[in-house]
Image (cartoon, rainbow, N blue to C red):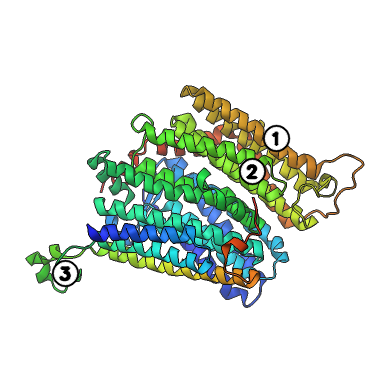
Amino acid sequence: MEGRLLPLFVAVPLAGAFLVPLLAKLWTRFSDLIANVVLALLLGITVHHWLMLSSTGMPMHYWVGGWRLIGIAMWFDALTALILLITNIVGFCAALYSVRYLDRYSSGRWKFYTLLLLLCAGLNGLAISGDLFNMFVFIEISAIASYALVAFGTEEEEVEAAFKYMVLGEVGGAVLLFGIALLYARASTLNLAHLSQVLIGMGRTPFYWFVIATLLIGFAIKMGMEPFHAWLADAHFSAPAPISAMLSGVFIKVTGVYAMCRIMFCVFGVARAETPAFFNLLIAFGAVSMVLGGLLAYSQSDYKRLLAYSSISQIGYILVALGIGNFWGIAGAMFHILAHALSKGTLFLTSGSVERATGTRNLDKLKSLERTMPLTSWSHILASFSMAGVPPFAGFFSKLLIIIGAISARMYWLAFLAALFSAVTFGYLTKVVKQAFFARKDVEPTKAKESPALMGVAMLVLVVLIILAGLGFKGILDYLVGPAAKVLLNGLEYARLVLGGY
Amino acid sequence: MIPYIACVLLFLIGLYVVISKRNLIKIVIGFSLIEYAVNLFFALVGFKKGALAPIITSGEQVRMGVARNFVDPIPQALVLTAIVIGLSTTALMLSLALRLYEKYKTFDISEIRRLKG
């Protein structure tokens, strides 16, 4: 089916990004307005496409300029739908939250919104692209926007974190480009579907594994997998709170996990039965990330740094679930991408509210905030429950699926590890809840005022979605997560669908 | 084969500079070396010895089969894009380095250590 509206996913946020600086000269508040309207529109377009996809069951394609295989391809299937939904939901909430949050920065707010829209344009473009080099360009667009956003406060720590993040991220980008060049040298095509067919013809040669390894290093850096995690904690720690939410909730998953899955499963055609080495590698690195990230999170006394290390641990969960490689495992990974984006998004937003109200993020200095900031506190508590896997929130079902996957693949130790680190997650998040929000009765609460209404609404939207995703998990599994997992499981089907009938 | 080996060497030299040097500007230079190595590699992929520039001037050429003797134009187009991306990243990296210099009064990365953990 032809999707005539697919280019809008790139065009709308890009147009917004260029309109913001122009119209902000007339009235500074235009920048807030445009960014929010544009991201709400983008969310609307995403939901429209998703509904169309679930009603017809037919993926949509668009050939830019009608050039077919030599041009740029756009492709919208169930996996794209899932990724676009989380990107645009968290993106919209971050923009809504920023309206009041940005009051504390002296730099112009239009700069922030321009960069935020560029970030969203890159992520949306990456998700719908069906062309290898195009994917690289969109990864770089969103990455460059994110470096600038991490440094947005322009204080010592922020610039330092941005520089470290940028050096590592760009080396990762160069490695990715090297991998793409290698692939082009052999296959003489960049269209993912065509590439997949050419690669099947070549068989699993040492060259095949070398390219996989090269690309994997690039994506590992982008997603903050364990040996390359150093940038992640600093960058998430220093960025403005809505950007931390975007980075942790969306950025590392889209440019890291999604792009890796799309290329490995749909182009290289990896499958548990045929290439177990690849999946065992994912499990090994995933398990190390899960364990180390979780333990490091325990020892932090800074609110945001704790959340950042927790993100490394949760990325580990997603990798382990992908590595299990059967339907339940991959569906669990997809569900966890959704659940973690919503709950970690909420947690970073609440951390921003707490910092805005009290001026500190040090957990030792925060006391009894539940009495003064009830909305923020309860958003944090509910999102923590979801992260830790307490029923009936979204995070419970994602971890349940992962454990079911591990057991049905007879990897009992992995199921045990996943359950154990679910408890560890619960432990370090309870530490925050206990210290910052509830304390002994005799302690005077830290002086604070509840955050403004718009910030509250942004957190509330995410919390409501977490609860809805948990209560309606059957629907999510049938219409969003399940089909996305099937796209990855039948990876080689992708080429047949894209090229079918041409 | 030698040009390809030179590319890999250039890449490794760049990586060495990024990892081992302490001066921010030198790190940026090392990163640029990595960029050049990858771009050069990509351009080499499309190269054919003794081939023509990929410009079709008349239908005659296509019929006579000259078109087969062209250099592959796609890597050239891609490398151009990659160079533009490299330009913007280098610019941003240098501006961050300058901001760091303003804040810390040094380019030495071992003295820029406000972040711990």
Give the label, 2 or 1, closer to the camera: 1
Which residue is painted at 48% across and 45% down in the image? Answer: A257
Say left or right for A74 vs A367: left
- Residue A4 spot, x, y in % from top left: 40, 56
Say left or right for A358 vs A129: right
- Disc 1 target residue: A427
Q: Amino acid at mark 2?
A: Ser
Q: Compare residues A288 and A115 and report the one nearer the observer.
A: A288
Up-down: is A475 above or below A343?
above
- Disc 3 target residue: B52
Q: CA distance from mark 2 to mark 1?
A: 16 Å
Q: Amino acid at mark 1?
A: Gly
Q: Quadrant of the N terminus of chain B?
A: bottom left
- Residue A448 spot, x, y in % from top left: 83, 54
Camera sees residue A121: no
**Dot 1: within a 10 Å radius of its alpha carbon, few (fewer than 14), some, or many (20 or more) residues?**
some
As drawn, which residue projects farthest toward the left?
B64
- Residue A425 spot, x, y in % from top left: 65, 36
Number of numbered labels in the structure image: 3
For disc 3, the chain is: B
Q: CA distance from mark 1 to mark 3?
A: 66 Å
Which residue is painted at 50% across and 60% down in the image? Answer: A167
Which picture quadrant has residue A268? Answer: top left
For disc 1, the chain is: A
Camera sees residue A104: yes
Q: Amino acid at mark 3?
A: Leu
* Same subunit, tags 2 and 1: yes
As drawn, which residue projects farthest toward the right?
A442
Mark 1 vs 3: CB contact within 8 A: no
- Disc 2 target residue: A343
